Image: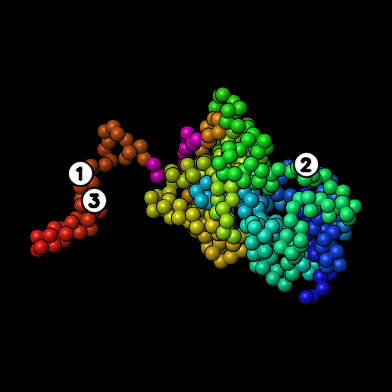
Amino acid sequence: MTQIKKVVLAYSGGLDTSAIIPWLKEQHDCEVVAFVADVGQDPEELEGVEEKAIASGASSCYVIDLKEAFVADYVNPILKTGALYEGTYLLGTSMARPIIAKAQVELALKVGADAVSHGCTGKGNDQVRFESTYAALAPQLAVIAPWREWSMKSRTDLLNYLAEKNIPTTASAEKIYSRDANAWHISHEGGELEDPYCEPTEQVWTWTKSPEQAPNEAQYVTLNFEQGVLTAVDGEAMTPYNALAYLNDIAANNGVGRIDIVENRLVGMKSRGCYETPGGTVINAALRGLETMVLDKSSFKFREQLGLEFSHVIYDGRWFTPLCEALLAASESLAKLVTGEIVVKLYKGHATVVKRKSPNSLYSEAFSTFEEDEVYNQKHAEGFIRLFSLSSRIAAMHAADQSEEK
């Protein structure tokens, strides 16, 4: 094995990556550079993270602000595809991994590292997402995945290891949940959630109000889109990240964005997770509502199929692939028409589209009205139906002929 001289570690400041820094130095006798991605997680998670990394043995720590790029270059394109993993999950963890891993690779090349490392476990999806990005962008870099190599098996093992190394940590063995947060969402796993027959307690949720505790009066929010991209909220132009942050606050207060699912992991097992995506739930509902105004039946059907396929592409960590590029190009083409204004009603956990308008709308009151009109000849439907059902008519006639022959 080639001697590793310098490794860039995707570092969070949590227990796992705090233990990885001294382990890397011990096992590989190498310099460790800590890399922290700011993708909009709670600012408290980033407080003192550089000092913590240095105290754990890192030679340096880079905190890179990716918030705006994350929303503009990853969240927005994914939203245009309509991707919902297994019909429910808005892909908050998986959509952040490509930009994090890409920035990690770029830093590794910049500082002259010959390896990259991450704190993903051997049971999860994230190891695939990170390492697929490494392979696509810098296959020459060695990859070190400590959870697949070391002998430690539990939080207690990690705490004991840090104590032996005299490395301070604020973590404790009593941590119940595994959480991952960014500007789009926060995920919760572990604790009582490992029993799928156990309803989540309120201590699981950290961002949104429960629907029961949400305000008793509905709140309305207006979203403006241009070619599938949110450009203004409540009449005020905003950057992609600021628009999301604004909607996160409003939607979380109204109990919007909670889901509790059992999903199929890429590695084969099922896992149970609770996700909070307040602002994202509102944006997704609004965008889908706008699509119903401007996309014809065949285009809308194709967009639905595209979204289903893309949900697996992003969940499985295949962002930097030709298939991903092709699907994104298709969604961009369809989104050229998705311009307009949507009003969403927020009430006790629900985000409901109640008003919609677009300069590209295919909706015509003159044609669809139940009142008298002068543009639609209902007699025309007879010929259409006869042709539309012709194959069924022929099949029935064929079956009748065969029956008579018997």
Considering only order in the chain, which callout, 3 or 1, is on the residue closer to the N terminus? 1
Label 3, secondary structure: give it. Answer: helix
* Amino acid type of the residue that numbered disc 2 sits on in the rendered structure: Glu
Mark 3 or 2: the one toward you: 2
Q: Is residue 362 left or right of residue 130?
A: left
In reply to whether residue 362 is colored magenta, the answer given is yes
Q: Earlier in the sequence, mark 3 or mark 2?
A: 2
Query: As displayed, is residue 304 above or below residue 30?
Result: above
**Residue occupied by mark 1:** 379
Cβ atoms under marks 3 and 2 closer than 8 Å: no
- CA distance separating discs 3 and 2: 63 Å
Tag 2 or tag 1, which sits nearer the N-term?
2
Where's residue 266, x and y in %?
58, 59
Quadrant of the image occupied by residue 25: bottom right
Image point (56%, 24%), residue name: 217
Element at label 1 = loop
Q: Magenta region: which residues?
A: 352-363
Looking at the image, residue 326 lies above or below residue 206: below
Q: Residue furthest right?
A: 166
Image quadrant where residue 114 sits: bottom right
| Res. 384 mark | 3
